[in-house]
Every structure is written in structure tokens, then in C-alpha cells.
Amino acid sequence: MQYRKLGKLGMETSILGFGCMRLPTRDTSTDSPDIDRVSFRALAQYALDEGINYFDTAYSYHSGQSEI
């Protein structure tokens, strides 16, 4: 994994990020707040294991549930 310095903070972030706008849900709606947490944990753990440390999330994703 390649990393870049994040501004003047001295932190390094992976150049590949994990987008949290469309997480797996327990129903058919892609923007549902009912996130399938078991599936998401597996995806997030895989991303972390591969060196991804940048997770792109926002309050509006999944009605505020993606940040939790």
C-alpha cells in the first residue's frame, strides 16, 4: 500500500480509501440506515488488513449510520 502525508499533521493516509456511502444493507435500498454490520465488519477488516487506513464517511450516508 502506498501512503501520503496528510497535510501538516504528520500523519500518513493510504492513497486508496474505503468509501462508506454504499455499505451493504439488510434490505434492498442502497441508502437504507439498516446496515448489515456483519458484512460491513468483514469488508472493513479486509481493508484494514490490506493497509487501508482512510475511510470516507459523512453524516448523510445511510441516514447518519455510516459514521457509527
Image: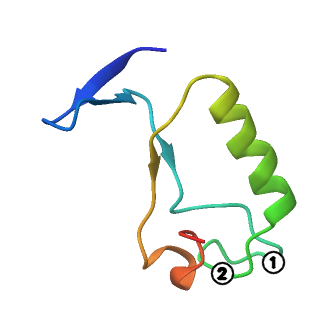
Assign a secondary structure to mark 2: loop
In this rendering, the answer to whether 44 lies above or below 1 is below
Name the residue carrying label 1: 27
Q: Is residue 7 left or right of residue 20?
A: left
Q: Residue furthest top?
A: 2
Identified by mark 1, the residue type is Asp
Q: Which sits in the foreground, 49 or 11?
A: 11
Q: Residue 29 appears at what percent x and percent y?
A: 68, 78
Q: Residue at x 49, y 73 (%)?
A: 61
Instruction: Give x and y (percent) for residue 44.
Output: 68, 44
The amino acid at mark 2 is Ser
**Do the residues bearing badges 2 and 1 touch, measured as CB atoms within 8 Å?**
yes
Q: CA distance from mark 2 to mark 1?
A: 7 Å
Q: From this viewpoint, which residue is outermost toward the left?
A: 8
Which of 45 and 16 lies nearest the eye of the viewer? 45
Residue 32 tag number: 2
Task: Establish if 30 lies above or below 15.
Answer: below
Q: Residue at position x 45%, y 38% from top?
A: 17
Percent of width and height locating residue 4 = 28, 22
Q: How many marks?
A: 2
Q: Is residue 29 left or right of residue 2?
A: right
* Precedes in sequence: disc 2 or disc 1: 1
